[in-house]
Amino acid sequence: MRKISDRPIGVFDSGVGGLTVMKEIMRQLPEEKVLYAGDTARVPYGIRSAETVVRYSLEMVDFLVRKGIKLLVVACNTASASALTAIKERFDIPVIGVIEPGARKALETTRSKKIGIIGTEGTIKSNSYVHAINALYGNKPIVMKEHGAIHFDRYFEVSLGGLSIFTKACPLFVPLAEEGWASSDVAVLTAGHYLEGLKKEPIDTLVLGCTHYPLLKGVISRIMGENITLIDSARETVIEVKKALLQYGIEGNSLSGPLWTYYVTDSPERFIKVGERFLSRKIEQIENINVGG
Ligand code: DGL
């Protein structure tokens, strides 16, 4: 028999970007209650050390767990890259990050076995997508000498027995998306600059490894060419969430009451302004919270 759980799903992000994942949940799982927590007082996570990202993430997730969530989605790529293991160790609920679903889809998609990954400095430095793709490809774990080095400021190739992965951090894409400039000439110039190296490689698949990048899909596709398949981690992650809800027998069927509640660590004005653009709908239930003392 199909089991039902009235408890909410928790979505955690460093700020407003996770709303690209939220939007997918609204589309694919319209009967689920969701509590979204955005650490707007401490965003961006993408430029911080892994230790700091782990500490912030545990504080934010602790807040959501105390609210009684049944499953957690770590919507932030940077937090998924650095803090997923720590979160899974600390909390006893199903936890889904965005790295593995994106990595899986990239592997399913590529024909040339050459994949590009773009993300924040933190995500690229962690090599998390590289490790995830490598593991899913069935290779032995790799010890990367470059781990934590500064290979985020130029495109960087890793060869994994028959697979090649090219990575590049594109930090300015985040403020461009938040400013509403995702389709502007500035975005085209910026993307042209960041993607110059990747464009010369024979990749056929490019993972948008950051919450904000789906907003720049049009511009990225224009620079890379239409033959390159762009992988939207948000979409893939929610497909995985759907499977997990079924597997654990905790699907929701909320037909009344507020479905979506937002918690932010800074005052809500900017979140509402930028967020309504990201979501293409109104943000109504929103509260300011304090985490981490
Ligand atoms: N949410 C972050 C990510 O997906 C981008 C914004 C940030 O740097 O905090 O990596």
Image (spheres, grey):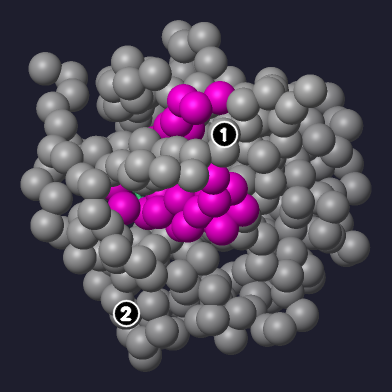
Question: Can the viewer see residue 170 in this picture?
Answer: yes
Magenta residue check for 224: no
Residue 141 screen position, x and y as percent: 76, 24
Q: According to the image, label 1 marks what residue?
A: 252
Kind of residue sitting beneath label 2: Trp
Residue 173 screen position, x and y as percent: 39, 66
The tag earlier along the polypeptide, 2 or 1, is 2
Disc 2 or disc 1, which is closer to the eye?
A: 1
Question: Can the viewer see residue 74 in this picture?
Answer: no
- Quarter of the image that includes the N terminus: top right
Q: Is residue 187 left or right of residue 199?
A: left
Disc 2 Cβ-to-ligand 1 distance below 8 Å? no
Element class at badge 1 = loop
**Magenta residue span:** 5-32
Q: Is residue 69 left or right of residue 43?
A: right
Disc 1 Cβ-to-ligand 1 distance below 8 Å? no
